[in-house]
Amino acid sequence: VLDAEAEPPSGASRRWQQVDVPALVGQARGGSPRAVGRLVSLVEDAHPALREVMAALAPHTGRAAVLGLTGAPGVGKSTTTTALVGALRRDGRRVGVLAVDPTSPFSGGALLGDRVRMQEHATDPGVFIRSMATRGHLGGLARATPQAVRVLEAAGCDVVLVETVGVGQSEVEVAALADTTVVLLAPGMGDGIQAAKAGILEVGDVFVVNKADREGADATARDISQMLGLGAPRRPGDWRPPVVKTVAATGAGIDELAQAIARHQDWLRSTGQLEHRRARRAAGEVEALALAALRGRIGDLDGGGRLDELACEVVAGRLDPYAAADRLVADLGG
Ligand SMILES: Nc1nc2c(ncn2[C@@H]2O[C@H](COP(=O)(O)OP(=O)(O)OP(=O)(O)O)[C@@H](O)[C@H]2O)c(=O)[nH]1
Ligand SMILES: [Mg+2]
């Protein structure tokens, strides 16, 4: 796309910057952190060139393991991510890190903190670290994250770690995007009851009680194990989420965590769950894009006037909502 212009969500007209997609993708494939950063920015902005970017990236994706790390603010996600990156690098794996902040519309203090914390990897050419803010962007976390993961995969990452702060629905969302979801808790702040309330017991493939140097870690780990046992009875061959204790700040327990993640990845592959999860994920992505396209076309019918017209008919009692929807759909086809 060389001369892309489109309407941003606000409706105000905006001139998009020109993008030489083949050149940019080529540079990213060659390992240029700048090109990778630029592509993730296009993802964040829902830039009109994204369609071409995704087409260019598609042949180079689907091979990376996608790990989601989620948990309450301050539980130690970034510290754990940094330690995991170290373990993966010692294994010779190329790693991408996406720190996704679903609450922040701009790159503020928290993300700056992440960058400082991950400084030890800043000059390693085998590590890409990128923060992404999604609030206020079209589709938010659910649209942008898989697209940014594709950018990192195409840049040659074997593993992509997605860190998301657990607020509201974001844990559940990140779980839907990852092959393996790691849920972090800390003593005293995330006991079993709290975790059950937040709905994270269902989404975790591996549970971590971080800050195990603090009092209460054993009790929290026991709580979580117990709550996990109360769920639906497991059948033979089902995955049993392990609970690992870590002190991310010193690296204690990180090897055990890496092993638990590797075991889950083996299980995913050997049971066919990996393909199943990825297919379900892609279906969700395609459906979301298709629905967005349909919504756009509805908005375009008579410059948006057709929907208003039908709505007036419904209000006046001349049409029922089903009949009005049928007409709208018929108009889309015609
Ligand atoms: N005592 C102790 N402190 C830790 C441990 N791991 C991390 N911390 C500290 O906890 C604080 C928060 O750590 P982060 O890694 O930034 O936590 P986070 O979950 O990424 O935080 P947000 O991204 O802001 O939600 C920092 O001051 C860390 O140094 C640990 O194992 N023990
Ligand atoms: Mg963090």
Image: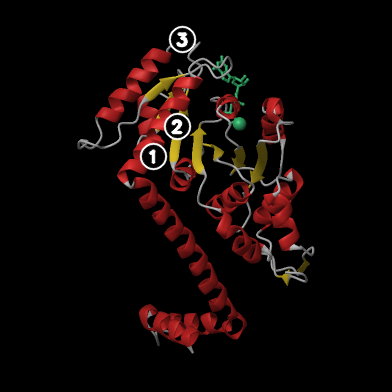
**Does 275 sit left or right of 110 as displayed?**
left
State the residue position of label 1: 203
Please state which amino acid type lies under the numbered disc 1.
Val
Q: Residue furthest bottom?
A: 334
Please state which amino acid type lies under the numbered disc 2.
Val
Tell which of 64 and 76 is nearer to you.
64
Q: Position of residue 229 (x, y in %)?
A: 25, 28
Please state which amino acid type lies under the numbered disc 3.
Glu
Determine whether the residue tagged by mark 1 lies in a helix, strand or loop: loop
- Front: mark 1 or 3: 1
Q: In which quadrant will I find the N terminus?
A: bottom right
State the residue position of label 3: 215
Q: Is residue 199 above or below residue 318?
A: above
**The residue carrying mark 2 has its beta carbon less than 8 Å from ligand 1:** no
Q: Earlier in the sequence, mark 2 or mark 3?
A: 2
State the residue position of label 2: 183
Spatial CA distance of label 2 from label 3 is 20 Å
Determine whether the residue tagged by mark 2 lies in a helix, strand or loop: strand
Tell me what residue is drawn at x 58 percent, y 17 percent.
Answer: 249
User: Are discs 2 and 3 less than 8 Å apart at CB?
Assistant: no
Tell me what residue is drawn at x 37 percent, y 43 percent.
Answer: 269
Q: Position of residue 321 (x, y in %)?
A: 39, 78
* Local crowd size for mark 1, using a 10 Å CA cut-off: few (<14), some (14–19), many (≥20): some
Determine whether the residue tagged by mark 3 lies in a helix, strand or loop: loop
Q: Earlier in the sequence, mark 2 or mark 1?
A: 2
Spatial CA distance of label 1 from label 3 is 26 Å
Tell which of 274 and 111 is nearer to you.
274
* Local crowd size for mark 2, using a 10 Å CA cut-off: few (<14), some (14–19), many (≥20): many
